[in-house]
Amino acid sequence: MCGISGSGKTVFAQGLESKGYVRVSADGILWSEYGPKFATLPSEQQREAFMTIGKQISEQTAQFISAGEKVVVDSTMCKRFKRDEIRAVCRSMGIEPVIVYLKAPYNILRERLASREGTGPDDQTISDDQLRNFFNNFEAPDDSEDAIIIEQQ
């Protein structure tokens, strides 16, 4: 999965869980390590935390694939190199991954994020400045990635 916060990745991934997939959640990992204080960390520390959990996401994905599980990675994967890392993990284990990009316009993202209260990993708050930064700097999959694009409206 990839998409900006509020695009519907978690809801989509939870739907796959109900069909037997195991969900590896970036937000779940962050919440288990930082709890609600993550939202109050300076942007640079949040960025460092996201970079650090990439390794954990890859490790968990590999462990579940090794155990014969179907896996959905619930993470923004906001940069091509992050998606390439997960592709490499999957391919090294004989699995061809599918990238699903949930694309949403800014106004829908802002509306969805405005209702968040910071009560858990799937309800983390995002400031307007953070959203603007995420939106402006997100590297959407290009044609070479052969991603499935789901437009949110």
Image (tube, rainbow, N blue to C red):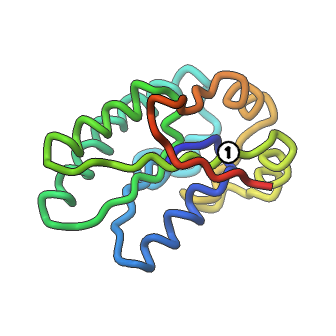
The answer to whether residue 141 of the structure is visible from this angle is: yes
> How many numbered markers are drawn?
1
Query: Residue 42 or 87: which is nearer the viewer?
Result: 87
- Secondary structure beneath dot 1 equals strand
Q: Nearer the viewer, residue 51 or 89?
A: 89
**Residue at image location 52% in from the left, 31% down from the top:** 143
**Amino acid at the residue labelled 1:** Lys
Identified at 60% across, 47% down, the residue is: 149
Q: Position of residue 130 (x, y in %)?
A: 72, 31
Q: Which residue corresponds to mark 1?
A: 103
Can residue 46 be seen here? The reply is: no
Q: Where is residue 148 drawn, in percent x and y?
A: 53, 49
Residue 85 versus residue 97 in the image, above or below: above
**Is residue 128 shown left or right of residue 102?**
right
Q: Is residue 9 above or below residue 48?
A: below
Near mark 1 (Cα within 10 A), the count class, few <14, some 14-19 or many ≥20, is many
The answer to whether 121 appears left or right of 23 in the picture is right
Between residue 41 and residue 11, name the one nearer to us.
11
What is the x, y in percent for residue 122? 58, 59
Residue at image location 16% in from the left, 66% down from the top: 68
Q: Is residue 49 above or below residue 103?
A: above
Image quadrant in which you'd find residue 103: top right
Residue 25, position as x, y percentages in the image: 43, 54
Q: Residue at x 40, y 25 (%)?
A: 81
Residue 54 is left or right of residue 108, and the answer is left
